Amino acid sequence: MTTERQEEKDGLHNMERHFGPHAKEYVEAIKKVSPEYYKINVEWAYGNIYENKVLDDKTRELLALAALSCMGYPTNQIKVHVRGAINCGASRDEVLEVIRMMVAYAGFPSTTNALMAAGEALDEHEAES
């Protein structure tokens, strides 16, 4: 059984691996708004769920993008996970194809919103590279 402190440490490490230099900014913004939500996000999601090694990091990020794309509105989260997918080895084409596939499950409006957000995130990433 892991301790809360270990889960926080693992969570921060996983977030840095996925989101690179943007991880610190992301977690500090969450912590400022809600320390309780910070604990849930960092310790439970990234310190516990992301510690399971059945799926590799790239697959996890592509699955997160698929799920978020079906929701239709979480454009900020889509941008975060596009960066995560790229940082974990996904190509631009893989990111866009995962989202395009969701049109069969989520419809055109949700998929269009997700593609537009992903396009912005990909362009920002390429401009920084």
Image (cartoon, grey):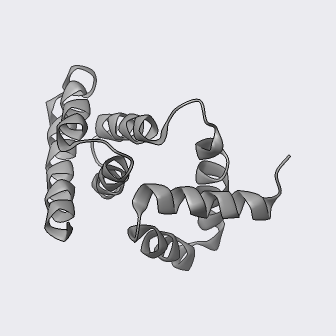
The one nearer the camera, 58 or 101, is 58
- Residue at (27, 53) in percent of width and height: 75
Direction from residue 34 to residue 122 in the image, left or right = left
- Residue 79 percent coordinates (x, y): 29, 55
The one nearer the camera, 29 or 9, is 9
Direction from residue 71 to residue 123 in the image, left or right = left
- Residue at (14, 67) in percent of width and height: 127
- Residue 71 percent coordinates (x, y): 33, 39
Q: How many labels does the image show?
A: 0
* Image: 70 above or below 85: above
The one nearer the camera, 85 or 89, is 89
The one nearer the camera, 123 or 105, is 123
Residue farthest along the right direction in this orientation: 1
* Image: 86 above or below 12: above
- Residue 87 percent coordinates (x, y): 35, 53
Q: Which quarter of the figure has residue 120?
A: bottom left
Q: Which quarter of the figure has residue 42?
A: bottom right
Residue farthest along the bottom direction in this orientation: 32
